[in-house]
Image (tube, rainbow, N blue to C red):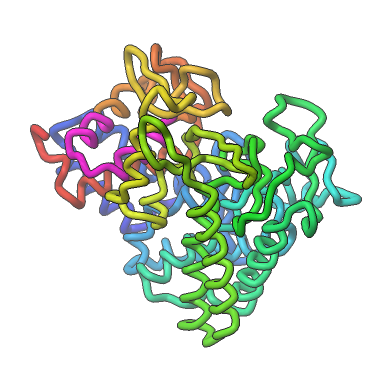
Amino acid sequence: MNLPESVREVIERAEKDLAHNPKLLHMFKQCYPNTLETTTRLMNDGTTFVFTGDIPAMWLRDSSAQVRHYLPLAAKDPELQRIIEGLVKRQLMYIGIDPYANAFNETANNNRYDDDLTELSEPNPWAWERKYEIDSLCYPIQLSYLYWKETGITALFDDTYKQTMQAIIRLWQAEQRHFEQSPYRFTRLTGPKTDTVINKGMGMPVNYTGMTWSGFRPSDDACTFGYLIPANMFASVVLGYMAEIAVNVYGDLPLKEEAEGLKEEIDHGIRTYGIYRHPVYGDIYAYETDGFGNYNLMDDANVPSLLSIPYLGYTTKEDPVYLNTRRFILSKSNPYYYEGSYAKGIGSPHTPPQYIWPIALSMQALTSTDPQEIAEIIETLTATDGDTGYMHEGFSVHNPSEFTRPWFAWANSLFGELIYTCMIENRLGAGK
């Protein structure tokens, strides 16, 4: 598609702001518009289909993250408004089809990643994959809320939107008592063990905590323990958004109170069950827990992550528990933190050992308060593109030419957001 005028203006500005760093300029000019140039389709029904890149399906998570960096431009650009509003409308349609699915087809073509065993008698022809992840339901609400705040436009908040909010709240309430109330089951008979939920598709037993259960992480890997802390933090933030929309747009006080009530229960669960007293780092947020006193101490590159929680709005960059957690996850105490001759950062069990993710590097910079750390990360990102000019899923810390997923639009978008943010804050001047 032709680029909206506001996006072209940002690229023109970059020609001046990044002129002193030709490679960074080249990468920004490729990555910033990448979603619009390669993964966005305007549909005849007024919706927008945004697929993830080298996979033909649209993830609720990825599609939201792929356009977030355009939000600051949307207020004065009708073309971007059409794209973003159309995307949210399609996301709402998908959630209405199956709120437990994470990725969908462009049409009801019955394409899917695998023939998984679920509680459904027949697979839905719209669903590419049915891995239930809390963040899949968070991202469309976050995108629409931030769009509203940037533009003042409330056109998205129709009856369908309100019904979707109510459906999300009901699902999260059911998953507070997963074994007693949830219909969800998921078993995959092929592939790695991280692609399936153990215990006949139900997962390991969990205790009631007030938090809501998740089958999978934002990496699409199965959770070790059912309460994924950063995803519950994201849900808490989004429930606050729902409460604000309920009262300020719909004038619906009962819906506001229901959203706030669930938010309070989840927050209490995070505070009570989600903090681990580490002998070296002090109080830190765990990545996962089961509510029985078992913890998974790690972080994953995918967002929501523990690294990303200030970016998501759950806490501040100065929060002492977050800072303790940040020190932990950016150290070798995190089993998915790797250091090599070319780079250091957070990877994922989703990719090979010693591979780190540009998404995690960009997020580390976006959540940092240290100008030197930010500058070093941008230098690392610029030097580890494998001479492609694009970001990738993961790359080897020993050889950036070894990478996964050459076309991964989310990583390009987040890199674009980081560089644009630094441009606005005048952090990329010559010699800096």
Number of numbered discs visible in the structure rendering: 0
Q: Is residue 9 above or below residue 131?
A: below
User: What is the chief secondary structure element of the magenta stretch?
Assistant: helix
* In the image, residue 177 lies in the stretch drawn in magenta: no
Which sits in the foreground, 326 or 83? 326
Q: Is residue 47 visible from the viewing direction of this image?
A: yes
Q: Image point 32% across, 16% down: which residue?
A: 342
Q: Image point 70% across, 32% down: which residue?
A: 195
> Which residue is most to the left?
431
Where are the magenta residues, as a range? 357-378
Q: What x and y, as percent, mark residue 193?
A: 72, 27
- Left/right of residue 223 with respect to residue 351 in the rendered view: right
* In the image, residue 364 lies in the stretch drawn in magenta: yes
Q: Is residue 69 above or below residue 89?
A: above
Which sits in the foreground, 217 or 412? 217
Q: Image point 56% across, 41% down: which residue?
A: 288
Q: In what quadrant of the picture does the C terminus appear?
A: top left
Q: Quadrant of residue 361?
A: top left
Q: Quadrant of residue 306?
A: top left
Q: Image point 36% across, 46% down: which residue?
A: 321
